[in-house]
Image (cartoon, rainbow, N blue to C red):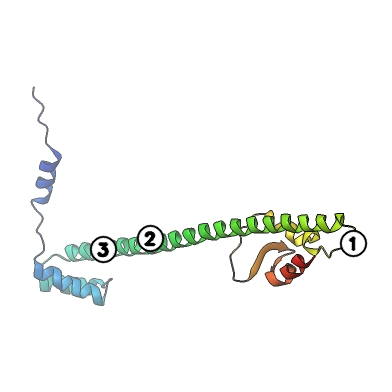
Amino acid sequence: MSVHRVSTSETKKNRNEGRKRFTDKQISFLEYMFETQSRPELRLKHQLAHKLGLHPRQVAIWFQNKRARSKSRQIEQEYNTLKHKYETLASKSESLKKENQALLNQLELLRNVAAEKHQEKSSSSSGEECDDRFANSPDVVMFGQEINVPFYDSVAYFEQGNGFLDIEEQLPDLQQLWEC
C-alpha cells in the first residue's frame, strides 16, 4: 500500500485550472469602474459581467478583493505617516529632554555661584543683607522635578496649581543676583 503525496504547488495548480484569468482589457475596465464606484449595485455588476464576458460572481469578487487591497494600502500609508510623525516627535522630545537637563545643570551652577557670593557677603563685615530671592524662591526648588507636559516657547515647565507660568515671571533678574 503506497501513500501518494501531492505537493502544495500541485494542489494549487489543480485548484486554479478551472479558473480563468482576466484579460488586461477586462482589468482596465474594472479598474476604471472601481474609480467611479467602488461598491456597484447588483444590476451594475450583472451589466459589467455581461459586457466583459464574465460571471456576475467573478465581478463581485473582483470588486470585493479590490476594496480589500485598497484598504490595506491605505492603512499601510496611514501607518507609515503616523510612524514618521511619531519618530519626529520622539526625536524632538528627546532633544527637549536633553535641553531641559542642560538648563537644570546651568540652574544648579547658578545656584552654587549665588550661594557662594551670598556666603562671601555674609562673612564680610559690611553687615548688609543681600536680596537672595533666587535661593529662597519656592518655584526654583521645583525645577528638579520631571514633568511630562507639552512644551511651549517661553514657558517655565514647573507646576503651580493646575497651570504653567511664564518663565520671566518666576525667575528673578539675573543681573540683581550678580550685584548681591
Whether residue 16 can be seen here: yes
What's the residue at 20%, 63% (across, down)? 62
Q: Which residue is mark 1?
A: 126
Camera-nearest residue between 106 and 86? 106
Camera-nearest residue between 51 and 143? 143
Pick the quarter of the image with the N terminus. top left
What's the residue at 68%, 69% (across, down)? 167
Q: CA distance from mark 2 to mark 1?
A: 69 Å
Q: Which mark is residue 64?
A: 3
Q: Which residue is mark 2?
A: 79
Amino acid carrying mark 3 in the image: Gln
Disc with the residue nearer the chain's start (1 vs 3) = 3
Pick the quarter of the image with the C terminus. bottom right
Whether residue 53 can be seen here: no
Please tell me whether mark 2 or mark 1 is closer to you in this view. 1
Q: Is residue 33 left or right of residue 127?
A: left
Please tell me whether mark 1 or mark 3 is closer to you in this view. 1
Circle 1/circle 3 CB separation < 8 Å = no
Q: Count how many numbered circles sit on residues in the image.
A: 3
Amino acid carrying mark 1 in the image: Ser
Query: Mark 2 Cα within 10 Å, few/some/many (few <14, many 20+)?
Result: few
Circle 2/circle 3 CB separation < 8 Å = no
Query: Mark 1 Cα within 10 Å, few/some/many (few <14, many 20+)?
Result: few
